[in-house]
Image: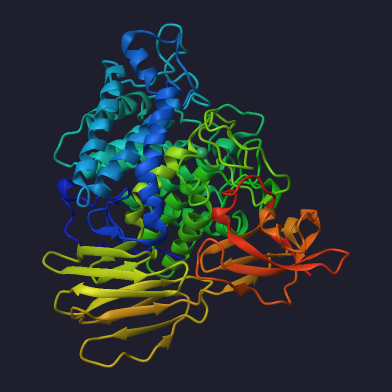
């Protein structure tokens, strides 16, 4: 597959009018529509955005205070370090990710709830002022290094996370710059000064090494785009090119842990720590795009292909090693050892989305499919329904019911039996928060010819394809409970416009039709999976209606995944379902050993009711007996919301 590098046909957006989106490449086949252009108006994702905004952000802010991770900046400013510093070496980054989440939330609420947006902005400004006070005269900013009694700056690149923290600072600054392009936010100036110092310290003539945890690459590249500073992108490229040559020390898990074993452009698959690998890949796409490096981009596309095929769980989760939070070998995807860190899922979405923006067209739907699978089955799984507890790792098989987490106590990071309010390593909660707050940017893209709707939610879309060519659309759908997606045209320019919709790979039998004011509806026509397009001169009120077959289905695993041979998974639309032990209560199988159960695939799955939180029952039998029961399965993202239970995604089959 090659990429065209085709221009969007759009006027190169001035920095003040760039889309309010996390990724705005210098060129591309299509561009993300930002928060000012897309509003999610209801349904599955709007519910999560609301809980995120009303509960999760304040929950995170409270824990950052309570654990002293914001106060570390106060101590730094007052000369109180290193005594009194609390949290791990990377705790600064959680403050930056929280600030990024608040920025996107402000952008999301600007039009609908300006009072709340202003309140959040004020709260963020107060935190930023505390961060600012800790920045040293030459731009250095980190609460863990560089003072008397602390290790010197840049002296522990393997584990110190200094550049990693700055990467998150830069992404946060990008969010504020795009949400408030004319306000001269203080965080943007903090980031600029830090970035200038990084260039001085790690430039061509500087320290010839990289950070053990990739992230600075993606942060620097986007900051360069947001501020019109191509030298930041060039520095990101330097970091990408340096890694893989053994510039970091060897460690017990090998240099593959931090992707320092093979240069990025020579690697054939993602390996090592799954979050690091995906952040690096996302940053490498950014620099490949902005420097027109087609070879690097092609290498990344093939790494994505193999990783998606062979190193990704059915949920979209990645990482099957607990000890180093890492990818296993090809096909090494055991359910009960799934690490599938929430952050790895988010990082994978970052990588996929960047490739989606560059693809000539052929693979757009595949990238969109993995983004969707991961959003529904990893990102949506992490937070508890109330938005105040999270999964860090996301197992696909819980053998023994876990213990309830104390809502007042910090958990070790990797407990996956039940969600916990906060972790010693708490990367995942603010990562979920920033993703939900910016989710509108993942709904649709545009190019000069039209709009591509990639993720389905009730939404309003309003953009310009080129100056004066405004398009406004309303998306109506009950997805993922129902498969009908209606895209109504509220405004369209004269001349032909192309509306494209993603038909997921699972949606064999999908159909599309157009309904126009002056004609009877066109005949539904069957469409292949991939992208389906309708090109015409649209009038106000015209509708393009896509129907996806949302019916529960059994899927058998690839036999090369040894650990799940003889099992099946139930899916409906984009959602993966799970068998949870609490659902045996009141059936003939109440109290049965969970390990003895199997699903009878000769009995059709049934849909019950209209809800999206239950909705599918399967015939479950107990091995060695004739007991059988109709047991409801729950969407995997909603498991463990009813107390301790056993759970499995891949179920032994008859
Ligand atoms: Zn995490």
Q: In which quadrant of the rendered view does residue 61 lie? A: top left
Determine the residue positioned at 56% across, 58% down.
308
Q: In this view, does 548 lie to the left or right of 332?
A: left
Q: In which quarter of the image is the C terminus?
A: bottom right
Residues 10 and 383: in front is 383
Determine the residue positioned at 47% across, 48% down.
346
Q: Most extreme residue toward the right, as rendered? A: 624
Determine the residue positioned at 19% across, 69% down.
471
Residue 339: x %, y % from top left: 62, 44
Q: In which quadrant of the rendered view does residue 237 lie? A: top left
Determine the residue positioned at 67% across, 41% down.
402
Residue 472 drawn above or below residue 223:
below
Residue 203: x %, y % from top left: 35, 29
Residue 418: x %, y % from top left: 60, 42
Q: In this view, does 593 lie to the left or right of 165?
A: right
Residue 530: x %, y % from top left: 45, 73
């Amino acid at each position: 597959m090659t990429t065209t590098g085709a221009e969007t046909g759009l006027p190169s957006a001035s920095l003040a009018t760039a889309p309010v989106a996390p990724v705005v490449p210098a060129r591309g086949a299509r561009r993300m529509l930002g928060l000012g252009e897309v509003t999610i108006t209801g349904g599955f994702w709007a519910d999560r955005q609301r809980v995120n905004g009303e509960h999760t952000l304040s929950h995170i802010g409270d824990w950052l205070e309570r654990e002293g991770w914001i106060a570390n900046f106060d101590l730094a400013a007052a000369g109180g370090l290193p005594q009194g510093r609390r949290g791990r070496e990377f705790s600064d980054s959680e403050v930056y990710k929280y600030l990024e989440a608040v920025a996107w939330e402000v952008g999301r609420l600007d039009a609908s709830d300006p009072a709340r947006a202003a309140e959040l902005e004020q709260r963020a400004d107060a935190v930023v002022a505390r961060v600012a006070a800790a920045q040293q005269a030459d731009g250095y900013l980190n609460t863990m290094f560089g003072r008397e009694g602390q290790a010197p700056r840049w002296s522990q690149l393997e584990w110190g996370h200094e550049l990693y923290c700055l990467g998150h600072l830069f992404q946060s600054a990008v969010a504020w710059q795009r949400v408030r392009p004319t306000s001269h936010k203080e965080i943007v100036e903090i980031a600029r000064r830090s970035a200038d110092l990084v260039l001085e310290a790690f430039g061509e003539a500087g320290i010839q090494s990289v950070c053990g945890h990739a992230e600075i690459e993606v942060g620097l590249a986007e900051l360069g785009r947001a501020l019109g500073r191509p030298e930041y992108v060039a520095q990101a490229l330097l970091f990408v090119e340096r890694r893989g040559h053994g510039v970091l020390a060897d460690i017990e898990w090998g240099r593959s842990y931090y992707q320092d074993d093979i240069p990025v452009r020579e690697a054939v698959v993602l390996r090592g720590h799954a979050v690091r690998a995906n952040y690096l890949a996302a940053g490498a796409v950014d620099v490949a795009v902005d420097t027109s490096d087609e070879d690097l981009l092609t290498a990344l596309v093939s790494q994505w292909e193999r990783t998606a095929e062979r190193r990704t769980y059915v949920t979209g989760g990645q990482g099957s090693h607990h000890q180093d939070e890492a990818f296993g070998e090809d096909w090494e995807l055991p359910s009960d050892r799934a690490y599938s860190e929430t952050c790895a899922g988010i990082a994978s979405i970052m990588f996929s989305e960047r490739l989606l923006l560059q693809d000539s067209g052929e693979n757009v739907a595949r990238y969109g499919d993995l983004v969707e699978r991961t959003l529904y089955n990893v990102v949506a799984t992490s937070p508890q329904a109330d938005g105040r507890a999270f999964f860090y790792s996301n197992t696909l098989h819980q053998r023994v019911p876990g213990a309830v987490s104390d809502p007042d106590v910090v958990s070790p990071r990797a407990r996956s039996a039940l969600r916990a309010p906060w972790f010693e390593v708490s990367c995942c909660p603010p990562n979920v928060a920033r993703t939900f707050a910016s989710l509108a940017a993942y709904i649709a893209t545009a190019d000069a010819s039209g709009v591509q709707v990639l993720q389905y939610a009730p939404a309003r879309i309003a953009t310009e394809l080129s100056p004066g060519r405004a398009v406004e659309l309303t998306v109506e759908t009950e997805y993922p409970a129902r498969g009908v997606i209606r895209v109504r045209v509220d405004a369209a320019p004269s001349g032909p416009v192309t509306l494209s919709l993603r038909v997921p790979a699972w949606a064999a039998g999908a159909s599309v039709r157009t309904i126009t004011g002056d004609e009877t509806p066109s005949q539904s026509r069957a469409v292949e999976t991939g992208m389906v397009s309708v090109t015409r001169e649209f009038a106000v009120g015209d509708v393009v209606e896509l129907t996806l077959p949302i019916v529960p289905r059994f899927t058998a695993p690839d036999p090369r995944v040894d650990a799940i041979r003889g099992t099946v998974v139930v899916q409906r639309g984009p959602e993966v379902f799970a068998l949870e032990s609490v659902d045996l209560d009141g059936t003939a199988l109440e109290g049965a050993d969970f390990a003895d159960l199997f699903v009878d695939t000769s009995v059709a799955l049934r849909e019950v009711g209209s809800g999206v939180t239950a909705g599918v029952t399967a015939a479950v039998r107990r091995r060695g007996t004739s007991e059988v029961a109709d047991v409801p399965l729950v969407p995997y993202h909603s498991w463990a919301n009813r107390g301790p239970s056993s759970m499995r995604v891949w179920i032994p089959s008859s």
